[in-house]
């Protein structure tokens, strides 16, 4: 079973949330201080944040370490841009420039204190320590476009570089230029897409002269990552690594494991700590990545399935490493959207934010010593602020009841008995199953292993799980082959037609789609989803299909679907539609659509912990999920309960139960399983007692219960000493249905019922 508790070197003490102000970028100097752009200003962190001086107007857009002198910061002002230096011995404005800063700016500081400003532009701006500004412009002849082979014609120069509109090729952009200093020279390289103007290799500046660095064997392709050493660099291009000897001017291919089904330039970032690390994109437009490590004997795969945004246009990964007191090196990696991975033990570990750390866009990871024997991992985040977590401390207590594992996009499905299936982000294809107890791998035998990739859709019907490859992978017009897994056996169907005749149509008509839409299954077996045409489409059990546009549901124009379809506690289909700026919940009762009375979240009673918290999602059992500082909350019909203390989650798209009745929360890139409750409450009623028009009924052992009178709506009621009180019942016979609920507002799936007569 995949280890998904907090990594072994992290203490289980609560994470300290220092500040919620967003951090867009951050760096660390040798003295351990953290310098960051925080709310558009420059700030320094020692054991707390301290704002630094800057221009009276404008915002900071770049920050970089300035050797032993502190940091330099680039500001965008109303008049242009300014460079500031912040340090112990000197601080203040270095230079003022009349032009705005380049797009996606990068700052590089030379040993003599000169600062280079580069970015998505042809301008290379050098600022000497004296404040003298020198601007150089990349010659268009030095730029290439690897895929389209279009020669750049730069007629003008703007802050965003040489961007032109071509009638045949559309708009083409320059790549992003970066720099480093080695062997007495400045070196420049660029990143970009295959239709960007980029440098084919390196550009050397020595003694005031720019020289394109060329040598036999240097690929003419987009450079995705460069890692400089003392006299050589590693350069990634065309899904491979190359070692460039800067002194001898030689290029040697660096052995690297083959990458299957990759597009060029998939090695996105390189890092050097005690070992050399390489982060690769798994494939075009796939969100997960692969992490490789070289300890001196060559690169080997460490982790297949790095979660979060790992793509061509993602920001660089955040990476930090440090040695524990026993000498063992530990490393942490976070991609643009997290999650955070730890490497230092026998296997990679997914760091569990079990103490409330909810990140959406990690911008930096830093090791900081806050006491003689106390070390913390400090995390800066673009949306959530700053957090710190103790490291190199023994585990004091385990974090029970919380499992997390990454998903490949949303390629997942539930079986009829509530088992969860998803595609592991590796090649060849591996189907994984969460049984409610453990994660099982259902790897297909040969020749199926080579027939499919993780860029697929998976669908479950009553008996089997179907795996349908992405249709854009070059299959014939007959459709892609489809794999079926059932009763422990894999079967392949040569094309979609055969698969449909074998029973896929009984499951869903949506074969071959990207797995972006969640399928809702109603109580009568109707399977529905938002299709690529913007409609809500359902496959009925008799093989027929029904589709609705958002306008057809609301009966008016200017309507659009706000969420994927879900199912309410009664098993009825529902969907949220935006009409004229208002989101409204609509329910299908089998014959018509009607606006639900609870079109918005019900008002929560005052004093509860989730009052005023934004709703995340509504589960299939009718509970609303909220994220607060106290933790994860659930609400039902105006009652709110703490579901998981210290856990804050955003981006939940659906919530339901697994086969063992655990709460399963699905986010964009991971599944969170709350395993601390595996039994639904059971309803045991005492004998009813009547006092006039008031009926009292004992619901044994339950703090909360739901009651329905004569088939009307269910209402959740707080019990007094396990007693349900009903007032105002009309005289005559009534049919009562009661289902007990626990402290997590989960209700009994088999209600108890009784008939009473009010006299």
Image (cartoon, grey):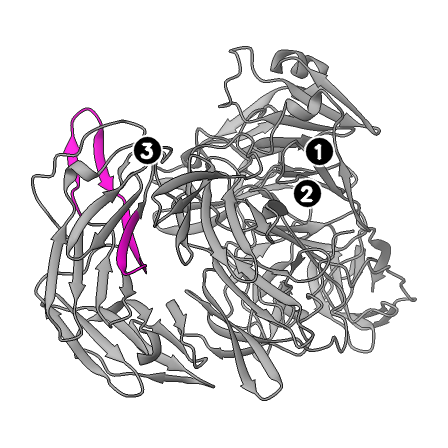
Number of marks drawn:
3
Task: Tell me if residue 639 can be seen.
Answer: yes
Q: Position of residue 123 (x, y in %)?
A: 16, 52
Query: Is the magenta region chiefly helix, strand or loop?
Result: strand
Mark sitting earlier along the chain (2/3): 3
Image mark for residue 359: none
Give the residue pinned by disc 2.
Answer: 571
Say what secondary structure mark 1 lies in.
Answer: loop
Q: Quadrant of residue 675?
A: bottom right
Which tag, 3 or 1, sits closer to the chain's start? Answer: 3
**Label 3 belongs to which residue?**
220
Residue 187: in magenta span: yes
Residue 16 x/y as whole percent: 56, 79
Residue sitting at 61 percent across and 67 percent down?
638
**Residue 671 vs residue 272: left or right?**
right
Q: Which mark is residue 524?
A: 1
Is-magenta flag for residue 204? no
**What residue appears at the point 63 percent right and 63 percent down from the top-left corner?**
351
Q: Which residues are magenta?
A: 161-189
Q: Residues within 10 Å of mark 3 (few under 14, many from 20)?
A: some
Residue found farthest to the front: 248
* Cα gap from disc 2 to disc 3, whole angstroms: 58 Å
Q: Count neighbours of disc 2 (C-alpha within 10 A) and say few if under 14, some if 14 to 19, many if 20 or more.
A: some
Is the C-beta separation of discs 2 and 3 under 8 Å? Answer: no
Tag in front: 3 or 1: 3
318 vs 679, nearest the viewer: 318
Q: Cα distance, mark 3 to mark 1?
A: 59 Å
Q: Secondary structure at mark 2?
A: loop
- Asked which quadrant contains residue 542, the reply is top right
Q: Position of residue 447 (x, y in %)?
A: 71, 20
Q: In this rendering, would 230 be left or right of 58?
A: right
């Amino acid at each position: 079973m995949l280890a998904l508790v907090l990594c072994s070197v992290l203490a289980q003490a609560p994470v300290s949330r220092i500040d919620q102000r967003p951090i867009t970028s951050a760096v660390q100097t040798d003295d351990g201080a953290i310098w960051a752009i925080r709310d558009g200003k420059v700030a320094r962190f020692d054991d707390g944040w301290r704002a630094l001086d800057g221009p009276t107007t404008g915002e900071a857009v770049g920050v970089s370490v300035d050797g032993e002198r502190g940091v330099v910061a680039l500001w965008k002002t109303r008049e242009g841009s300014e460079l500031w230096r912040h340090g112990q011995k000197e601080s203040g404005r270095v230079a003022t420039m009349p032009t705005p800063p380049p797009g996606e700016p990068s700052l590089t500081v030379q040993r003599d204190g000169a600062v280079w400003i580069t970015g998505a532009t042809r301008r290379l701006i050098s600022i000497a320590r004296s404040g003298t500004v020198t601007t150089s412009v990349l010659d268009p002849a030095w730029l290439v476009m690897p895929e389209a082979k279009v020669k750049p014609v730069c007629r003008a120069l703007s802050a965003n570089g040489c961007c032109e509109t071509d009638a045949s090729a559309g708009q083409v952009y320059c790549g992003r230029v970066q720099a480093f200093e080695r062997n007495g020279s400045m070196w420049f390289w660029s990143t970009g897409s295959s239709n960007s103007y980029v440098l084919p290799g390196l550009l050397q500046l020595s003694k005031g002269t720019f020289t394109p660095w060329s040598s036999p064997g240097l690929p003419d392709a987009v450079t995705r990552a460069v890692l400089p050493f003392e006299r050589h660099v590693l350069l990634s291009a065309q899904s491979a690594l190359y070692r460039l000897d800067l002194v001898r001017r030689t290029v040697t291919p660096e052995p690297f494991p083959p990458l299957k089904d990759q597009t060029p330039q998939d090695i996105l970032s390189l890092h050097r700590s005690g070992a050399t690390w390489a982060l690769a994109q798994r494939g075009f437009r796939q969100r997960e990545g692969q992490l490789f490590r070289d300890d001196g004997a060559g690169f080997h795969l460490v982790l297949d399935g790095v979660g979060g945004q790992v793509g061509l246009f993602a920001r660089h990964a955040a990476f930090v490493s440090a040695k524990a007191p026993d000498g063992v090196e530990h490393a942490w990696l976070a991609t643009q959207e997290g999650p955070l991975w730890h490497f230092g033990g026998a296997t990679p570990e997914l760091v569990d934010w079990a103490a409330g750390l909810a990140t959406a866009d990690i911008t930096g990871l830093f090791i900081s010593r806050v006491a003689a024997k106390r070390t913390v991992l400090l995390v800066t985040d673009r949306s959530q602020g700053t957090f710190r977590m103790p490291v190199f401390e023994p585990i004091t207590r385990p974090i029970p009841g919380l499992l997390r594992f990454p998903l490949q996009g949303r390629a997942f499905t539930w079986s009829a008995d509530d088992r969860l299936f998803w595609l592991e982000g590796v090649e060849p294809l591996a189907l994984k199953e969460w049984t409610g107890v453990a994660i099982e791998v259902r790897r297909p035998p040969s020749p199926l292993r080579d027939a499919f990739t993780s860029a697929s859709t998976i669908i479950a019907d009553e008996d089997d799980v179907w795996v349908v490859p992405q249709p854009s992978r070059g299959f014939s017009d007959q459709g892609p082959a489809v794999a079926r897994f059932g009763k422990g056996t894999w079967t392949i169907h040569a094309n979609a037609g055969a698969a449909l005749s074998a029973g896929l149509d009984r499951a869903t008509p949506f074969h071959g789609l990207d797995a972006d839409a969640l399928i809702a299954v109603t109580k009568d077996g109707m399977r529905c989803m938002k299709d690529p045409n913007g409609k809500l489409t359902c496959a009925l059990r008799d093989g027929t299909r029904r589709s609705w546009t958002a306008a057809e549901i609301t009966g008016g124009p200017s309507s659009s679907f706000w969420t994927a379809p879900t199912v309410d506690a009664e098993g009825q289909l529902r969907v949220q539609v935006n009409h004229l700026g208002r989101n409204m919940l609509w329910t299908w009762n089998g014959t018509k659509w009607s606006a639900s009375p609870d079109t918005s979240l019900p008002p929560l009673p005052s004093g509860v912990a989730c009052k005023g918290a934004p709703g995340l999602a509504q589960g299939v059992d009718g509970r609303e999920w909220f994220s607060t500082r106290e933790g994860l909350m659930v609400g039902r019909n105006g009652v709110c309960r703490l579901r998981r203390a210290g856990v804050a989650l955003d981006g939940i798209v659906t919530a339901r139960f697994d086969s063992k009745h655990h709460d399963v929360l699905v986010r964009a890139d991971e599944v969170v399983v709350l395993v601390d409750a595996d039994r639904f409450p059971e309803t045991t009623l005492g004998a009813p007692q009547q006092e006039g028009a008031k009926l009292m009924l004992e619901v044994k052992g339950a703090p909360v219960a739901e009651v329905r009178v004569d088939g009307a709506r269910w209402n959740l009621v707080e019990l007094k000493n396990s007693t349900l009180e009903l007032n105002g019942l009309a005289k005559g016979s009534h049919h009562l249905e009661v289902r007990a609920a626990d402290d997590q507002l989960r209700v009994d799936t088999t209600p108890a019922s009784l008939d009473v007569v009010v006299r």
